[in-house]
Structure formats: C-alpha cells, structure tokens
Image (tube, rainbow, N blue to C red):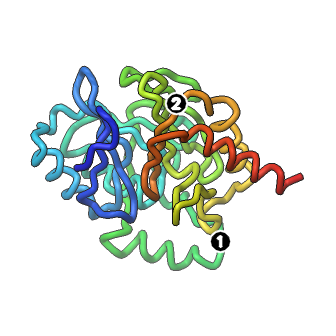
Amino acid sequence: MKQIIPGLWEINEIGDDVHCYVWEWADGITLIDAGFPTDAATILNALTTHGYALHQVQRIIVTHVDVDHSGGLAALKRATRAPVACHAVEKKFLENPKLRQPAAYYLRPAYWFLTSFTSKYRMRAVVPDELLVDGQSLPEGFTVIHTPGHTPGHISLLHKEKRLLITGDALSNRDGQLRQPIHLYTPDERNTIRSIWKLAKKYGNDYDAIVFGHGPPILQNGGKRITALASQIFSQEI
C-alpha cells in the first residue's frame, strides 16, 4: 500500500486500472471502493500484510456501482463482516448489478457477456447496510457529496479537516489532465458536468488534495484545478 497523505492509503497492489483506498481513523479503518471481482483477495492480503486485522475494517464505502469499483465488494464484505454503505439512489444497482449498463448501446451485449460469464467481470449482488445522502457527515470525518451523472447514485467524499476530496469517477486525472468520466459508460453527461460544477463552486475552497478512481493524485491546489475545469466546461456550453 502507498500512503497519499497521513491517514489515506492507496491499495496499489491491485495495479493502476482502478484505485481503491484505506482510510485510517480513531475506530479502525474504512475501505473506499472494492476493485474488480478478482481484486478482493489481493486487497485482503494487502491489509493483513500491512498489519491490519480484518475485524478492524469498520465500513466499506462504495462511491458507485461499476465492475471496477464494486466488483470485489461481496467477497470483501463476507471476509471482513463490515457494513457496506452507498448512496440511497445506488442501492438498486448494488442489489442488482445487471441494471448498471454502458451508455453506449453497442457495448451492452459484450458487457452482459463479460459480467455474466467471466471471473474478472462477474459481479455479485450485495445488500447495502447503510444508505447515504447528500451532505451527510460520517464518523470517519467525511462529508458525502452526491455527484450523479456517471451513475445516478454516485458519491464523492470530502474531508474538510484534511482538505481532501475523494472523487470516485466524478472525474479522472488522465495523461496529466482532469477529465470528465468516459462518456461510453456515463449515461447522464448533463448531470456529470453539474456535479463537477458542484465540486468546484460549492466545495472548491475546502480541499487541496484530490484522489481519483483513475489517474494519479493531486496533492496541491486541487480545488483551484477543478474550478478551472468547471469554468472551461461551462464556457464551452455557452
């Protein structure tokens, strides 16, 4: 595992296709996202290798339902017995992952086949234990920010004291540039840009460091960079 800032670790043992995180706090640790279905064993091994007992996992927070973010969730929940939390709107997708479909219709047959018959992509249903809402304060110190677009119940997490934003897939940092999520898997692009605007205009003064589901972290001036991206997007819209 790799420390990003004090208290936040990236589980880099699973590689760079997607990023999942461990948050250390007073009561134990919280996992943020769960990787692909085949990543669960690697995540569990990473935790124990770094000295964490599985019973120390107090909660698993899912930013959204996608095979690369929630695929390992069922196995992680079973191994740790930790409660699973997601946004209330995302509940139906967690309980029935087949409802999550690519935005591009031509990808849907291949996506159905992969998620039904291949071990890397086959997701299992999970019943969430806690349903989160926008603006909710969590005992870990995070504020829940509903950032729909990529999925209807997508959330980002803000830790004001640490000046940290965990975006999930609300946006990514690819090739040195902040970007909107991949449109082929984003059914509601209008709400996606509204969510970026929300992160910029409502919360942009509250964070410096940003970590993403895809791409390297930003450790300085993160709020300013997302504000600049939002301004660029909306200047193109006008």
In the picture, measured across the screen, residue 82 lies left or right of residue 170, that is left
Depth-wise, is mark 2 or mark 1 nearer the camera?
A: 2
Taking the spot 37% from the left edge, 42% from the top edge, the residue there is: 32
- Residue with the most extreme right position: 238
Residue type at tag 1: Ala
Q: Callout 2 environment at 10 Å: few (<14), some (14 to 19), or many (20+)?
A: many
Question: Between disc 2 and disc 1, whose residue precedes?
Answer: 1
Q: Nearer the viewer, residue 112 or 52?
A: 52
Of 27 and 59, which appears nearest the observer? 27
Label 1, residues with CA under 10 Å away: few <14, some 14-19, many ≥20:
few
| Mark linked to residue 104 | 1
* Label 2, label 1: how far apart the Cα atoms are: 29 Å
In the displayed structure image, the side of residue 100 where residue 126 appears, left or right: left
Count of picture labels: 2
Residue in the image at 23% along x and 34% along y: 57
The answer to whether 39 appears left or right of 112 in the picture is left
Residue 177, x across and y down, in percent: 57, 59
Q: Is residue 48 above or below residue 129?
A: below
- Three-letter code, disc 2: Val
Regarding mark 2 in the picture, which secondary structure is present there?
strand
Q: Secondary structure at mark 1?
A: loop
Which numbered circle lies on residue 96?
none
Instruction: Describe residue 190's horizontal placement relative to residue 32 as left or right.
Output: right
Residue 29 vertical placement versus 98 (above, below)? above
Residue at left offset 58%, top offset 76%: 107
Q: Are marks 2 and 1 in contact (CB under 8 Å)?
A: no
Which residue is labeled 2 in the image? Answer: 144
Q: Position of residue 27 (x, y in %)?
A: 24, 22
Residue 233 vs 221, above or below: the answer is below
